[in-house]
Image (cartoon, grey):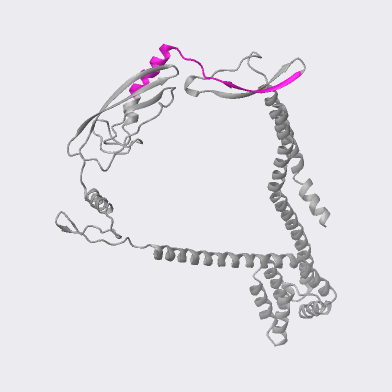
Amino acid sequence: MGKEFLKLITDGPKYIKIIFAAGVLLSVLLGGMAYKNRFLDNEYELIRKDAKDGSYEEEVIAYVGEEKVPLTVTVESRTISKEEAETQFAQAEHLLPELLKGENENLSNISSDINFVDWIPQSAVEVTWIEKQPDYFYNDGKLRKDRSQSESVDLIFTGILTCQEYTKDFEITGRLLPKISTTETMLLEMIEKESSSDFNVLRLPKELQGKTVTWKKPLDLTFLYVALLTLASTAALLIGKQVDERAEKQQRIDALEKEYAQIVSKFTMLLSAGLSVRNAWERIVVMQKRKGVPEKLIEQELRVSLRELQKGIPELSVYERFGQRIGEVHFKKLMALFVSDKRRGSVPLLDAMNQEMLSAWEEQKRKTRQQGEKIGTKLMLPMMGMLSVVFLIVLVPAFLSLKL
């Protein structure tokens, strides 16, 4: 049975052939690309990139006679002309005010941080700032909070644009709006003054512009996080419990379905020997008890129903309760046959039982094949992982050998 099951996994879907064909095709494609890329342009040329893209390094192999010499060559960017540099300078001067304004709407109304860029995007132009107005801004462009300013101030930012060996001075004007004293800034200034004292404690201001200031710490929201975590954990546990119950119920049904064909066969055999349904029921329970092996789930249920019969409960009620307690459709159908036989006689029951037995065995074979196919599909992921490892083992040394 084990060999046949493994054969079903490997030969049925033909996964090995598909993976092998895909691996060979991928290897051929990578090999062709690697062979094509090893040749230089015109055999002696490396393409220089534009100035904005900078230089790059290229690994090459020089064949000097029979000697093989691996080298790493630095390919500098293409040298631009004076006219090209002037064009890039013009574009940079056009973009600089937009880049410099940072978070502000424009440079005529500066009220927050600005951006001292080091280079112009999509170009080879670098920016060196000479005048950054240190009285109002830090070197990173952040607006100084400790500035004393009650009126708007006209500013001039100067620097140098550099594009390879070409340079050009630039000048940008702007207007810094007066400092607005908000409640927050005034409190911070008062606290900053108090921080410079040598006392062991920092005394927070008690009054601001004639108004009393009351200080409190922010509400610690840890309790809220714990409450949310508790609710989430409780919900997860309830959902998990429901999932486990459904899984256990499904496992029970699957186990009963696997045992159905054998139980039908036993009943058919005993009924063919002339036993009644009740006697056959007793014989199956007794036979299992004599074997001395752990009872299966269905046999435990049979024993429960036998006890009910022995207590004097009517057979029809026992059969109906058995089907309801099991809850599996095949056993309900079997109990319906027993109930019908009890009412009409046993002549049609044998034919129905033989037919049900054949149907049960065919159904079990079909489900076994389906389970094998599912397991084969689940094995695809580890098989692909093993294939990837094989590719790495084979292709990495091949690529390294091409660069030697």
Left or right of 210? Residue 401 is: right
Number of marks = 0
Magenta region: 67-94
Quadrant position of residue 13: top right
Is 120 situated above or below 187?
Answer: above
Magenta segment includes 79? yes
Name the spot of residue 299 as percent of width and height, x first. 74, 75
Left or right of 127? Residue 280 is: right
Q: Quadrant of the C terminus?
A: top right
Quadrant position of residue 339: bottom right
Is 387 situated above or below 198?
Answer: above
Please state which of residues 215 and 273 is positioned toward the viewer in this rendering. 215
Name the spot of residue 166 as percent of width and height, x first. 41, 16
Left or right of 134? Residue 81 is: right
> In the orientation shown, which residue stands out farthest toward the left?
210
Q: Residue at x 33, y 20 (%)?
A: 169
Magenta segment includes 294? no
Quadrant position of residue 127: top left
Q: Residue at x 41, y 27 (%)?
A: 119
Please state which of residues 366 and 396 is positioned toward the viewer in this rendering. 396
Name the spot of residue 288 as percent of width and height, x first. 80, 76
Q: Residue at x 76, y 49 (%)?
A: 9
Q: Quadrant of the N terminus?
A: bottom right
Name the spot of residue 76 as percent of width and height, x first. 54, 19
